[in-house]
Amino acid sequence: MHSIHLTIVLAPLAAAIIAGLFGNTIGRSAAHWITNIAVGLSFVLSMVVLKHLYLDGGVAENYSLYTWAVSDGLRMEVGFLIDRLSALMMVVVTFVSWMVHIYTIGYMQDDPGYQRFFSFISLFTFAMLMLVMSNNFLQLFFGWEAVGV
């Protein structure tokens, strides 16, 4: 399940990086396809996690991916807490984000910053997922701040 959790978070981030850095090279259509597929994948995998916790009797998971700083006994880690509430919120966040991605294909059609917009909205989805899935206050704070940028 850990790889599924990572994929849920990292798919929108990878799409944001691709659309942001290579948007002019890959074109408008590819930028929205890549970001839509990534967020759609996150939604489907979030549904898998929700099913696992609600229907299959899965247990909540709280784990750290890595420790990025240690200072005088204080450990700053990046990790996930996946319980029923966070799984439900993952589904809500990814579904709403996916619907916004789909809607804005037409809405932003004539905008000169088309690729940049899809990069930013996928980055927003990544930040919201980090906020929802965080297992510590520091990571939650970073997710909160990234959502507000």
Image: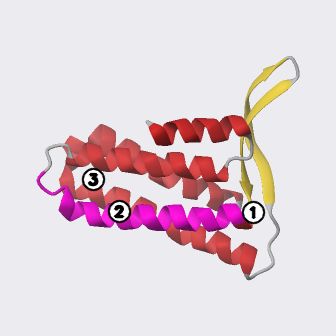
**Which x, y percent locates residue 40?**
44, 67
Q: Which residue: 74% across, 46% down?
A: 135
| SS category of the residue bearing label 1 | loop
> SS class of the residue under badge 2?
helix
The magenta-colored residue range is: 85-110
Magenta region, main secondary structure = helix
Which of the labelled discs sits on residue 126, or is there none? none
- Crowdedness of circle 3 by 10 Å Cα count: few (<14), some, many (20+)? many
As drawn, the label of residue 100 is 2
Mark closer to the observer (3, 2): 2
Which tag, 2 or 1, sits closer to the chain's start? 1
- Looking at this rendering, what residue extends furthest in the left direction? 110
Q: CA distance from mark 3 to mark 2?
A: 15 Å
Q: Nearer the viewer, residue 67 or 94?
A: 94
For disc 3, the marked residue is 31
Give the residue number, with chain letter if any, for mark 1: 83
Say if mark 3 contacts mark 1, CB within 8 Å.
no
Type of the residue with mark 3: Ala
Neighbour tally class for label 1: few under 14, some 14-19, many 20 plus, Cα within 10 Å: some
Tell me how far mark 2 sits from mark 1, CA to CA: 26 Å
Horizontal arrangement in the rendering, residue 22 relative to residue 17 (left or right): left
Q: Residue reaching furthest top? A: 72
Q: CA distance from mark 3 to mark 1?
A: 33 Å
